[in-house]
Structures are given as C-alpha cells and as structure tokens.
Image: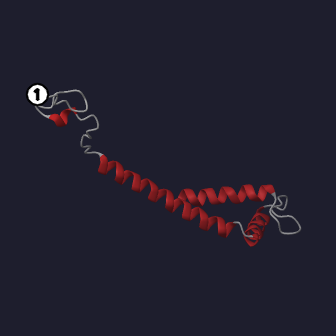
C-alpha cells in the first residue's frame, strides 16, 4: 500500500505531518500593533482631509479673496489680489494657498 501524502512523504513515518504542510502560517504577535498603527495613520489622514476640505470651502470663496485684498491694502497699495471683476489673481491664489497650508499645519 502506497501511503504517500501530497508532498511525497510517507505519512506513516512522519512524526508530525503538520510540519510539512507548505502553507502553514506562523503566528505573528505584531499583527495587532501593525493594525492599530494603520488605523491611527488613516484616522489622521481622514482628519487632515476634512480640515483641508473645510478650509478650502471657506477660503476659496470670492468674498474671502476680497477680505484678503482689504487686509493686504492696509499694508501696501502696490499688490493686487483680485482683478476688477473680483476674481483672484495668481498672486492672490498663492497667498491664500500659503494661508491654508499654515492653518492646516497648525491644526
């Protein structure tokens, strides 16, 4: 009688057949720590994305650029943030982006 297992070993002569199973998983004691770190990482990313979304909605409005233009005009009259139609100019977008970045960094 040929009593060989799938891997060619005689099952009757092997002390512990489970040692020869090719896909046996070894217990990993670090799985919970890795899982917790991943959850913390994604929670932080989610919070940051919500903060940036709220800041974007608040600061991308045309009125926010008008307020920024008024604040800049207090210090100097040479810088134009918005054009005559109230649309932001590239310098205004750059300054608003810096403000949003700083607020996001602080939060």
Q: Quadrant of the N terminus?
A: top left
Q: Residue furthest bottom?
A: 63
In percent of width and height, residue 106 lies at: 54, 59
Colour convention of the picture: secondary structure
The residue positioned 59% from the left and 61% from the top of the image is: 103
Q: Secondary structure at mark 1?
A: loop
Answer left or right for 9 relative to 57: left
Q: From the image, tell me which residue sits under label 1.
A: 13
In percent of width and height, residue 65 lies at: 75, 67
The residue positioned 62% from the left and 66% from the top of the image is: 55
Q: Nearer the viewer, residue 54 or 94?
A: 54
The residue positioned 68% from the left and 67% from the top of the image is: 59
How many numbered marks are there?
1
Tell me the quarter of the picture where residue 15 sits: top left
In percent of width and height, residue 88 lies at: 80, 63
Above or below, 11 against 26 in this view is above
Tell me the quarter of the picture where residue 69 sits: bottom right
Q: Nearer the viewer, residue 99 or 46?
A: 46
Q: Nearer the viewer, residue 41 or 76?
A: 41
The residue positioned 19% from the left and 34% from the top of the image is: 19
In percent of width and height, residue 44 lies at: 46, 57
Above or below, 81 against 21 in this view is below
Answer left or right for 11 relative to 95: left
């Amino acid at each position: 009688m040929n009593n060989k297992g799938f891997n060619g070993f005689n099952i009757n002569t092997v002390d512990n057949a489970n040692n020869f199973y090719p896909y046996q998983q070894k217990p990993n004691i670090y799985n919970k720590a890795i899982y917790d770190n991943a959850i913390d990482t994604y929670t932080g990313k989610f919070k940051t994305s919500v903060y940036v979304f709220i800041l974007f909605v608040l600061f991308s409005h045309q009125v926010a650029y008008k307020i920024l233009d008024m604040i800049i005009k207090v210090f100097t009259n040479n810088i134009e943030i918005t054009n005559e139609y109230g649309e932001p100019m590239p310098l205004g977008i750059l300054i608003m982006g810096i403000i949003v970045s700083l607020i996001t960094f602080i939060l």
